[in-house]
């Protein structure tokens, strides 16, 4: 079996190995109310993919906060945003209150589950758009490139959490970390395989 055929075979499923019933993973308990609302509003593939990646990044930030370690997982931005001007407070004006942390009372395994569930939801959306031809290939490629860039970051915190789960003999956390690691690896492979099929198709259409 040559490399070209292997790529086509793997990409033909376009990541369906991750597919679960949509109702089982979309808008589940792992999302905060604000996150679920933003995802519902993002009807197109690319914006919705970005919102799910913000969910993953928020979980990584919460894990960093709890562990006291400097984990940094960010969603790539298309354009560098201008820093907001800091409004000076008037004399006697109280300082603005810090927003409440919506993940404060989430258990650690549930936070980690949010990572795997979000990545699975992205791939389900990609798979549906591709199979049902509900999105142009260009839009799917844009979403996959975003996913590829995001998942190329260092997810060292999963290794550290696995060590913690082993030391604490925490089976629930261990399973959550394993699921997150598997979802991350499959998302990386899926984005790569999907791009390997779709980008040549787009280039071929341009030349016609």
Image (cartoon, rainbow, N blue to C red):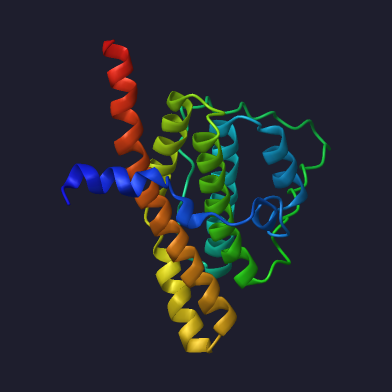
Residue closest to the eye, 38 or 182 = 182
Left or right, 91 with respect to 13, comes to right
Residue 169: image location, x then y, percent:
53, 89
In screen coordinates, is 186 left or right of 50? left
Q: Seen from this angle, which residue lies furthest front?
A: 1
**In-front residue for pair 174/125:** 125
In the image, is residue 87 above or below residue 97? Answer: above
Query: What percent of the width, then of the height, locates residue 154?
Result: 37, 56
Quadrant of the rendered image containing residue 37: top right
| Residue 152 in the image, given as x and y percentages of width and height | 35, 49
> What's the residue at 50%, 68% (across, down)?
179
User: Which percent across, then down, holds residue 120?
Assistant: 54, 53
* Residue at 46 percent of width and 32 percent of height: 140
Q: Is residue 38 above or below residue 135?
A: below
Q: Is residue 79 visible?
A: no
Query: What quarter of the picture does the C terminus occupy?
Result: top left
Residue found at the far left of this picture: 2
Is residue 21 visible in the rendered structure shown here? yes
């Amino acid at each position: 079996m040559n490399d070209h055929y292997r790529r086509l075979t793997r990409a033909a499923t376009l990541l369906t190995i991750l597919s679960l019933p949509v109702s089982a993973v979309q808008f589940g308990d792992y999302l905060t109310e604000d996150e679920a609302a933003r995802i519902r509003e993002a009807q197109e593939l690319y914006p919705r993919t970005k919102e799910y990646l913000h969910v993953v990044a928020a979980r990584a930030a919460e894990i960093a906060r709890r562990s006291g370690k400097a984990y940094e997982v960010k969603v790539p931005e298309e354009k560098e945003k201008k820093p907001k001007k800091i409004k000076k407070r008037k004399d006697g004006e109280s300082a603005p209150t810090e927003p409440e942390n919506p993940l404060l009372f989430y258990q650690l395994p549930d936070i980690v589950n949010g990572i795997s569930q979000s990545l699975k939801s992205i791939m389900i959306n990609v798979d549906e758009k591709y199979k049902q031809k509900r999105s142009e290939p260009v839009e799917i490629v844009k979403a996959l490139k975003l996913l590829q860039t995001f998942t190329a970051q260092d997810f060292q915190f999963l290794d550290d959490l696995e060590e913690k789960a082993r030391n604490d003999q925490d089976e629930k956390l261990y399973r959550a970390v394993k699921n997150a690691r598997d979802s991350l690896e499959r998302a990386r492979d899926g984005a790569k395989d999907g791009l390997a099929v779709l980008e040549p198709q787009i280039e071929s259409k341009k030349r016609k």
